[in-house]
Amino acid sequence: MVAINYSYIKNTYMKIVSSLLFVTLLVACSDKKQDDTKKDANKNAPIHYDVALVEQKGVTTQLKLPSQLVAYQQVSIFPKVNGYVKTVLVDIGSKVKKGDLLMILEAPELEEAVLQAKEKFARAKSDFSIDKDKYFRLIEAAQTPGAVSPLDLSSAKTKMEADSALSNAEKANWNMQQTMMEYLKVIAPFDGVITIRNVHPGALVSAAIKDIPMLELKEVKHLRLEVDIPENVSAQLKQHDTLSFVVDAFPGKKMVGVISRKSMNINTQMHVERIELDVYNNDEKLAPGMFADVVYDAKGTTGALSVPKSAVVTSTERKYVIAVRDNKSVKVDVTTGNESIDKVEIFGDIKEGEKVIVNANDDIKEGITIQ
């Protein structure tokens, strides 16, 4: 009977398993090393991006800027004195000339005040006249030594001067009351059209209430076109330049206005400058309040560089292009100017003839090799 050596068999089995594990580990390490080598090779391999040359050329573009027509002059008319509306001579749409009578108010207490002021002035004037006559008579009498005492002469002069001052004051008060009476007549301050009427005969109006005007008057034959121009464009414009504009009421019809006023102030939030154009509306087809679009053909900025619009990356922190320098990507901060459908002006630390990545984005890292 053959004896089986189980210990020998076990040791042999363990040696075979160990050898197999060792071979497997060697193969795995070899594969990992090959994978790492491939990754390093891929990492250092140049990446292909489409590039474009930076051109020294301004970009011509057409700007369409929202604007609004307003009256050259407009005024809300409130009562200067308290009273009742007696007559309203105009209505909405009424065309008036400067100096035309628009409304008449009535205030009986003002009429009474005028009469009282007149009477007080007449009385003060009479007293002054009597005292003046008395004073000059005393001067004549004083020519005779001892006839008039110096105290009497001085007192008469003082009283005459006091009555003169009182007479002047009463006259001023009377004039003031007459002026207040004139405010009962509401006069047009300039040529225009009545656009708002809020009162009717019999209504009580108060000088203390300034919420709702009695009438509103606007000049319509001469209008202002208010438009906010981007600062990079406003610097190219000057007074007396002409700009075209269109309004929705007359589609396709271009109109012209003349730049008359520049605010000379840049809005720090929107970076725009308010400009006003004078628009003469003799046929009265336009109306205050109409919206308009100012059309401006912006010429290319002298000395500007231009790149494809897709080459400029705008993030929350910066605006830049990705230049290719020595086959490496370099992010260059820029500011932009005029732009067209496919081109944009840039200004920054970049030169004509340099290459920039066309379809740039924020995921492209700086310093990578570019093919």
Image (spheres, rainbow, N blue to C red):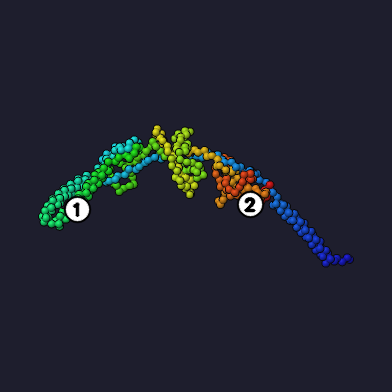
The picture places residue 364, in percent across and down from the top left corner, at 63, 50
Query: For mark 1, what is the residue?
Result: 162
The label nearer to you, 2 versus 1, is 1
The picture places residue 169, in percent across and down from the top left corner, at 22, 50
Using residue 207 as the reference point, say whether residue 305 is left or right of it: right
Q: How many marks?
A: 2
Rendered view: 95 above or below 270: above
Residue extending furthest right?
1
Query: For mark 2, what is the residue?
Result: 366
Could you tell me which residue is drawn at 16 percent across and 48 percent down?
129
Could you tell me which residue is drawn at 69 percent across and 52 percent down?
43
Asked whether 232 or 127 is in front, the reply is: 127
Question: Which badge, 2 or 1, comes first in the chain's sequence?
Answer: 1
Could you tell me which residue is drawn at 29 percent across and 45 percent down?
80
SS for callout 2: loop
Q: Residues within 10 Å of mark 2 (few under 14, many from 20)?
A: some
Asked whether 282 or 8 is in front, the reply is: 282
Asked whether 103 or 249 is in front, the reply is: 103
Rendered view: 62 above or below 10: above
SS for callout 1: helix
> Mark 2 to mark 1: distance in Å?
93 Å
Asked whether residue 106 is in view, the answer is: yes
Amino acid carrying mark 2 in the image: Glu
Amino acid carrying mark 1 in the image: Ala
In the picture, which quadrant includes the N terminus? bottom right
Could you tell me which residue is drawn at 79 percent across and 58 percent down?
23
Circles 2, 1 touching at the beta carbon (< 8 Å) = no
Mark number, residue 305 = none
Using residue 360 as the reference point, say whether residue 197 is left or right of it: left
The picture places residue 300, in percent across and down from the top left corner, at 55, 40
Asked whether residue 68 is in view, the answer is: no
